[in-house]
Image (cartoon, rainbow, N blue to C red):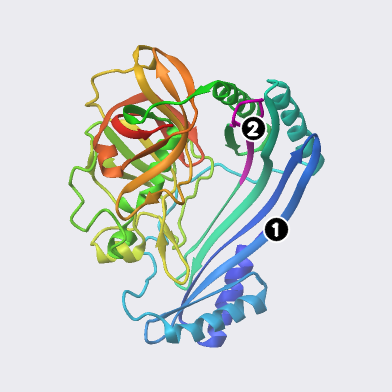
Amino acid sequence: MLNIKKIAEYAQLSAKELGIKKYDIYGSSIDDTSVEVDGGEPKQVQASNRSSVIVRVWNKQKTVGVATTTDLDNEGIKLALETAREASVFGNENNTPEFSPEAKKPTAKLSRSLTNAAPIPTLVDILIKTEKKLLEAHQAITGVPYNGLSQENVMRFYLNSEGAVRQEEGSYSSIYLYSRTEEEGKKPRGASSVKISHSLSDLDVDGCLKEVIEKTISHINYQSIPSGKYRVILSPTSFLSLVGAFSNIFNAQNILDNQSLSTRDSLGTEIASPLLCLCDDALHPDSIVTETFDGEGTPTRRVELIANGILSGLLHSTGTAKQMNAKPTGHANIGSKVTVSSHFYHVFASEKQAQKLSLEESDGIILIDRLQALHAGVNSLQGSFSLPFDGWFVNKGKLTSIDAATVAGDIQDVLKSIIYIESKAEVLPGGICPRVWIDELSITGE
């Protein structure tokens, strides 16, 4: 893994030798092991160590050059600094990035450490046994075409010429299963599940298996539905998928680039039902991949994005915060251009929620489990989407799988049409979220 003190020493000595006064470096190192199986045999086994750093150098004209390298010894760091200095001549003179004013402030203290990776044969054995159980769960399940079990150790760091030095590390394990059915006279069906934890010993392999089996069996007997307007329930996965697809609403860099559904004046306006509250919380206790600082060294934190339907916050880098008279929020990714992205969403209901709805008492409702083709069916600048989905038709609590259908709408209308947010939340890799009820959406069936 990375030796941060050595890299800091290399950078300081090389910068002095090259006459560089201002620089910063962000880097990471990942030790990764992953396996896939097929029919009880290993299909793919991978092990890798990937280390890289991004170096930024400011020249006397205060423009910035950027260079990357995977060579982390003294010569590699020196060459990266020299290359970045040469590139700084061509740097953008407008909105030049600066060091984060919070790069030296304390970050959250997390009790985490790296765990020893299990041997590859152990991973293969676990996944083969899991695949076997899935295939034996129902005669219609004929394959597990997509699967994977992985573990990785990650170390990240940030340092700059003003003496800021940060580093953190963590271990993560994950399992992914996707089933496929084949029955005469019926279309192939499938279901998927993913689980993630800090270590292989804590990984909920059985929970992942159970979820895939239950969903797969529920999709075997399907029926078509007529096109029309339906009350829709979005699963935690599907609601977070929509939030992620239209994250430009909360992204300050997108707003400044005129690539957002929001504007500089949108803060404080009502953009959703008063029932909806949404935060981005990098330090949420249920988040497995927790980051305590961003690419600029800014400490991460909980950021309130929507409070009772009101747009109450944005995700900022140091540059966007300066331009919008705000504070950086710990969401920056450095590179040739500093970008902004989310960490871990937390969706919950406001205290204004009074009514309570349930599947058992509902009739003629669509429960959407997973949205598909998000890369093609979303127009993030117009707010519109048209997406095929996996889901069920709900009749008094009875779920019947839907043959094939597409849901279409506008994200701004969807957010304002929320009529109920359930209390029980599900923890997913990208956030924690309950099921969300939408008053009406257009469904195209067969």
Residue that label 2 marks: 179
Query: Which segment did they paint magenta?
Result: 171-190
Quarter of image, res 43: top right
Mark 1 or mark 2: which is in front?
Answer: 2
Give me the residue at 24% from left, 39% from top.
272
The amino acid type found where label 1 is placed reads Asn
Q: Earlier in the sequence, mark 1 or mark 2?
A: 1
Quarter of image, res 105: bottom left
The amino acid type found where label 2 is placed reads Ser
Which quarter of the rendering shows the N terminus? bottom right
Residue that label 1 marks: 49
Give me the residue at 36% from left, 52% from top.
379
Of residues 403 and 242, the one nearer the viewer is 403
Which quarter of the rendering shows the C terminus? top left
Res. 307 visible in picture: no
Q: Callout 1: 10 Å neighbours few (<14), some, many (20+)?
A: few
Q: Secondary structure at mark 1?
A: strand
Quarter of image, res 366: top left
Of residues 256 and 23, the one nearer the viewer is 256
Q: Would you say 169 lies left or right of 105 here?
A: right
Q: Callout 2: 10 Å neighbours few (<14), some, many (20+)?
A: many
Residue 56 position, x and y percent, is: 48, 74
In the image, residue 164 sits, relative to residue 311, either above or below, namely below
In the image, residue 6 sits, relative to residue 48, either above or below, namely below
